[in-house]
Image (cartoon, grey):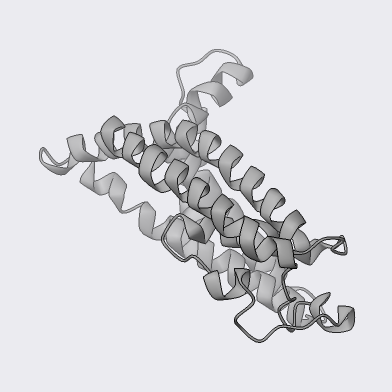
Amino acid sequence: MVWVFTIFLEEVRQFLESYASTFRSKVWSYLHDTWNILDLATILLFVLGVILRLAPGPSPQLLDAARVVLSINLITFFSRILHIFSISKQLGPKLSMIYQMIQDLMWFVAILLVFIISYAVASEAVLYPESELNWKLFFYLPRKAYWHIYGELFLEDIEGENTCTNDPNLYNNYSVLRCPSDVGRYFVPILLGLYILMTNVLLLNLLIAMF
């Protein structure tokens, strides 16, 4: 905690010593540096994680949330090491290239999300009609569509070859996979082929060409 507090004091010093004249311009000047944003995120995640961890009467859910937040915080702490590499004549330019590539990747991900969401909703509607709307559906809905990009096709699930059930009490809580519809067994594999063609063959090769 003392170490994080010293990091906080250093960030305050950088903010106050900015050459900007107004408070708003100081904030803009401070946030214009990506490393400052990373430092700020590191401090905020640490504070949030400690609050969740030390909350009175901690529940298992709060402890799990604290572990997740602090694990992400650990990643940001390690990422700060890259700042040291930026002064290297060999590693500095490579870090700049990676940063520019990430910026280009964000626009590519926006395009990719259109294909992922459209395929996920269309395939789910045909495979499992009249599904119950709940928060688990929003978690599981894009999961298959996303992992399809990396070659995980889930053909056994799509064609109903794995253990499945038609009992709503079982498949609504996702304890057992729901059996796909008859039309979905034949239509969705065709849709999957077109989806893989667009994402893996076209879009990912476009991404490689951009880089």
Q: x%, y% of residue 98?
A: 29, 39
In the rendered view, does 106 fall on the left or right side of 185?
Answer: left
Q: Which residue is drawn at 60% across and 64% down?
A: 69
Q: x%, y% of residue 177?
A: 71, 78
Query: Which one is in front, 150 or 89?
Result: 150
**Residue 1 shows up from this direction:** no
In the rendered view, does 53 fall on the left or right side of 130?
Answer: left
Q: x%, y% of residue 196?
A: 46, 50
Query: Which one is in front, 160 or 143?
Result: 160
Q: Looking at this view, name the residue that lies furthest to the bottom.
A: 163
Q: Looking at this view, name the residue that lies furthest to the left.
A: 90
> Splitting the image into 4 quarters, where does residue 183 fall?
bottom right
Residue 78, compared with residue 31, is above or below; it is below
Query: Which one is in front, 22 or 107?
Result: 107
Q: Looking at this view, name the residue that lies furthest to the top.
A: 21
Image mark count: 0
Q: x%, y% of residue 25?
A: 56, 17
Residue 151, compared with residue 32, is above or below; it is below
Q: Which residue is drawn at 67% across and 76% down?
A: 64
> Splitting the image into 4 quarters, where does residue 186 fall?
bottom right
In the rendered view, does 141 fall on the left or right side of 78?
Answer: right
Looking at the rendering, in which quadrant would you find the C terminus? top left
Residue 60, compared with residue 31, is above or below; it is below
Q: Which residue is drawn at 82% across and 82% down?
A: 57
Q: Residue at x 41, y 38 (%)?
A: 203
In the rendered view, does 41 fall on the left or right side of 103?
Answer: right
**Residue 122 shows up from this direction:** yes
